[in-house]
Image: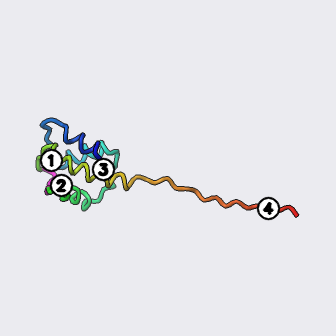
Amino acid sequence: RWQAFKHFYDAEEVQYTGQQFLVALADYLKINLDDVPRSTRYYWFSQANLSYNALHSYQSKDLALVAFVAAKWAINRRAQPVKSATIEVLTLAL
């Protein structure tokens, strides 16, 4: 999470539109933006006290907190390895 924050925070004087940022963020987090519900995108911005607008320009430093929140979502959405349950049948020789 902190890596995503730092990635966008350390970008010197970079500006993104809301849509450009989401594309860059999805690329950075290696997620498919189509899998992110619209309400979730708005939630990420609201948690950073920003209003999401696809055409509005934002400073990268302001978007760092959005990236932090989004990274938590991405981590939680990663496919968890499924433990396969195998049933072993023991045969007794009588």
Kindly indicate whether the residue at mark 4 contacts the one at mark 3 (C-beta within 8 angstroms): no
Q: List the residue tagged with mark 2.
A: 48
Q: List the residue tagged with mark 1.
A: 62
For the residues marked 3 and 2, what is the alpha-carbon distance in whole angstroms? 13 Å
Q: Which mark is residue 71?
A: 3
Q: Position of residue 20 (x, y in %)?
A: 20, 45
Q: Residue at x 58, y 56 (%)?
A: 84
User: 10 Å neighbourhood of mark 1: few (<14), some, or many (≥20)?
Assistant: some
Q: Pick whichever of labels 2 and 1 is earlier in the sequence.
A: 2
Please state which of residues 53 and 75 is positioned toward the viewer in this rendering. Answer: 75
Kindly indicate whether the residue at mark 1 contacts the one at mark 2 (C-beta within 8 angstroms): yes
Give the colouring mode of the picture. rainbow
12 horizontally vs 83: left or right: left
Please state which of residues 40 and 38 is positioned toward the viewer in this rendering. Answer: 40
User: Three-letter amino acid code at disc 4?
Assistant: Thr
Looking at the rendering, the stretch of residues picked out in magenta corresponds to: 50-55
User: Three-letter amino acid code at disc 1?
Assistant: Asp
